């Protein structure tokens, strides 16, 4: 059992516990903190996979910006404890079995395809870690049009959020 | 070296938990968080595949997914605020105008 495996097991346990806490928590703020736990453990897994830049923006954008937005809205709306209503019968009798079936099916098909495949597709040579330099070269040459389009998308999102949240007088 | 299948199964488990949260939670903000959890699970699969096949395209895609998630969170939370203002409630069962 090498160190990478230990880090992977620790982070995956942390992520799954966080996801379970997100579902089971009654207070929205607790759910938000559980989601931050999931995101930080995923960032460590990205580091383990050699994607340092993705790990950095995972922390900065997801755990930083997006979760702050969530916590901000929770506090702004004064979201309290979730009221326990009777779950609709359809969700209880169809939703849960379907969810479990979906999970099992995904695990089965992934494991059948990739199970026990320790070797890398590219041969025996260990892959070089994806450097930020290579990533940015690709982003600004091959993917420059989508990159520019995302700026328009963000602009539209900001305008849309402003228009939606504006109090009409 | 951790086999890729472990990452994919973790990704599948997280996605499944996201689906369960999406279906079962009643608070509209928590439902949003479940969606973010599913996006994160898919990102993990992208990064794992990118590592496995030694291709950078997966990482580029993760980058775009994160950007779209940020935009989605901004617009979605604005919609949540409007709903909370109009309905005086965050429970999705109170938003049932189009419910069959």
Image (spheres, coloured by chain):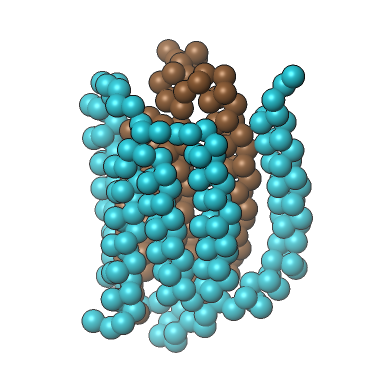
Quarter that holds the C terminus of chain A:
top right
Q: Which of A82 and B65 is in front in this view?
A: A82
Quarter that holds the N terminus of chain A:
bottom left
Residue B10: which quarter of the image? bottom left
* Residue B20 in sight: no
Give coordinates of residue A158: x percent, y percent. 71, 42
Q: Nearer the viewer, residue A45 or A107?
A: A45
Q: Which chain is brown?
A: B
Give coordinates of residue A61: x percent, y percent. 58, 58
Residue A95: which quarter of the image? top left
Give coordinates of residue A48: x percent, y percent. 42, 75
Q: Nearer the viewer, residue A156 or A97?
A: A156
Give coordinates of residue B34: x percent, y percent. 42, 43
Q: The cyan chain is which one?
A: A
Q: Is residue A18 left or right of residue B75?
A: left
Identify whether A22 is placed above or below B24. Answer: below
Q: In this view, does B95 lie to the left or right of B2?
A: right
Task: Give the number of marks.
Answer: 0
Identify whether A2 is placed above or below B35. Answer: below
Identify whether A46 is placed above or below A122. Answer: above
Residue sitting at x 42%, y 13%: B100
Residue sitting at x 44%, y 86%: A125
Residue sitting at x 32%, y 42%: A25
* Residue A24 in sight: yes
Residue sitting at x 25%, y 27%: A92
Q: Nearer the viewer, residue B5 or B24?
A: B24
């Amino acid at each position: 059992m090498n160190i990478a495996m230990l880090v992977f097991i620790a982070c995956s346990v942390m992520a799954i516990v966080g996801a379970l806490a997100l579902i089971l928590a009654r207070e929205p703020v607790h759910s938000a903190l559980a989601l931050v736990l999931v995101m930080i453990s995923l960032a460590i897994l990205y580091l383990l996979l050699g994607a340092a830049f993705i790990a950095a923006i995972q922390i900065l954008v997801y755990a930083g910006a997006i979760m702050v937005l969530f916590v901000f809205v929770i506090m702004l709306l004064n979201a309290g404890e979730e009221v326990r209503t009777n779950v609709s019968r359809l969700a209880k009798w169809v939703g849960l079995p379907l969810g479990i079936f979906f999970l099992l099916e995904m695990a089965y098909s992934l494991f059948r395809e990739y199970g026990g495949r320790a070797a890398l597709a590219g041969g025996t040579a260990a892959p070089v870690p994806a450097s930020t330099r290579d990533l940015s070269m690709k982003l600004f040459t091959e993917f420059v049009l989508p990159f520019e389009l995302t700026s328009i998308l963000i602009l539209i999102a900001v305008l849309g959020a402003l228009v939606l949240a504006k109090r009409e007088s | 070296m951790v086999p890729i299948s472990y990452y994919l199964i973790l990704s599948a488990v997280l996605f499944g938990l996201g689906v369960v949260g999406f279906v079962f939670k009643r608070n509209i903000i928590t439902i949003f968080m479940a969606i973010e959890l599913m996006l994160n699970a898919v990102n993990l699969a992208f990064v794992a595949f990118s590592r496995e096949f030694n291709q950078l395209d997966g990482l580029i895609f993760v980058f775009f997914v994160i950007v779209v998630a940020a935009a989605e969170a901004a617009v979605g939370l604005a919609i949540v605020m409007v709903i909370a203002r109009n309905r005086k409630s965050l429970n999705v069962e109170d938003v049932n105008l189009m419910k069959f």
